[in-house]
Image: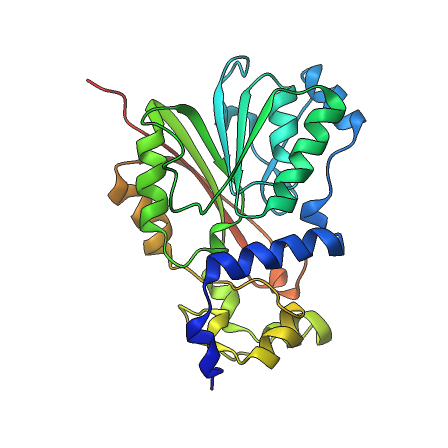
Amino acid sequence: MADSRAVTIDPVAHNREAWDRQVDYGNEWTRPVGPDVVARARAGDWSVVLIGYVPTPRDWFPPVMEGVDLLGLASGGGQQGPVLAAAGASVTVFDNSPKQLARDEEVATREGLALRTVLGDMRDLSAFGDETFDVVFNPVSNVFCPDLAPVWRECFRVLRPGGVLMCGFMNPDVYIFDGYALDERKELVIAHSVPFSTLELSDSERDRTYGPGGPIEYSHTMTEQIGGQLAAGFLLTHFAEAPHHADVTSRLMPGYYASRAIKPART
């Protein structure tokens, strides 16, 4: 049974602190890109990931990146944002973790990139006006967000007509397995029904599986993911999948999905 204190957890505040700690621990998604990666991006040789280690297809992006207004949604860490800025886009990185944003600022300062950072919850993009961006690039991160409908509504609002939303997200079926058995014993032990949140675990179970004070995660359904984008007004154009980069579920199923959708142009 879940710890009674779990219901009092503010997931935004908790995950902000948790991801700041991930930066301190050196989590692979918090390690900034090096000068060589930025140099190649400036020369036109660049790629970024939405899911796992699989490069996002270049034809998902505008053919010319120069001058594209791009929002890196919940994509702090000094990885995607600096690469896209070096490729020519005008990049704003929005993230819930100050230390993740500091990684982007570090690379921008080191490489002389024009890159803006904004702190906040991905469900609330009120820092930005209507129709501000041409692209929203959202690598796997909504797994840390309690509800997705506000995310899709806000993405739709801040995109210009014809704008593109790219999103990476977890296969919710991964969460039927016991996380500790996956990570520590490489065993597939069915333990949960979905939808599932790690808030359903006791504090000690969460700490054992995700580390002390690890991020709270939510296994959103495909209805919330794809259905939610469609309900917000988006039109789906592309869909992809990839194995999970770090656990044994990859031999059974894709661990990640990626979607590309557009905000319809005005007629």
Q: Is residue 54 above or below residue 252?
A: above
Residue drawn at point x = 63 percent, y = 44 percent:
100
Where is residue 67? Give x, y as percent. Answer: 51, 13
Where is residue 25? Give x, y as percent. Answer: 75, 56
| 68 left or right, relative to 41 | left
Question: What is the basis of the colouring in this image?
Answer: rainbow
Where is residue 150? Give x, y as percent. Answer: 32, 47
Residue drawn at point x = 25 percent, y = 44 percent:
231
Residue drawn at point x = 44 percent, y = 55 percent:
145
Q: Is residue 171 visible?
A: no
Please, which residue is most extreme toward the left here? 267
| Quadrant into which the C terminus falls | top left
| 265 left or right, relative to 50 | left
Q: Is residue 131 above or below residue 140?
A: above
Which quadrant holds residue 147?
A: bottom left
| 155 left or right, relative to 14 | left
Q: Is residue 33 visible?
A: yes
Residue drawn at point x = 45 percent, y = 83 percent:
4
Which quadrant holds residue 159?
A: top left
The count of marks equals 0
Please, which residue is most extreme toward the bottom here? 1
Q: Is residue 228 above or below residue 109?
A: below
| 263 left or right, relative to 33 | left
Where is residue 188? Give x, y as percent. Answer: 61, 75
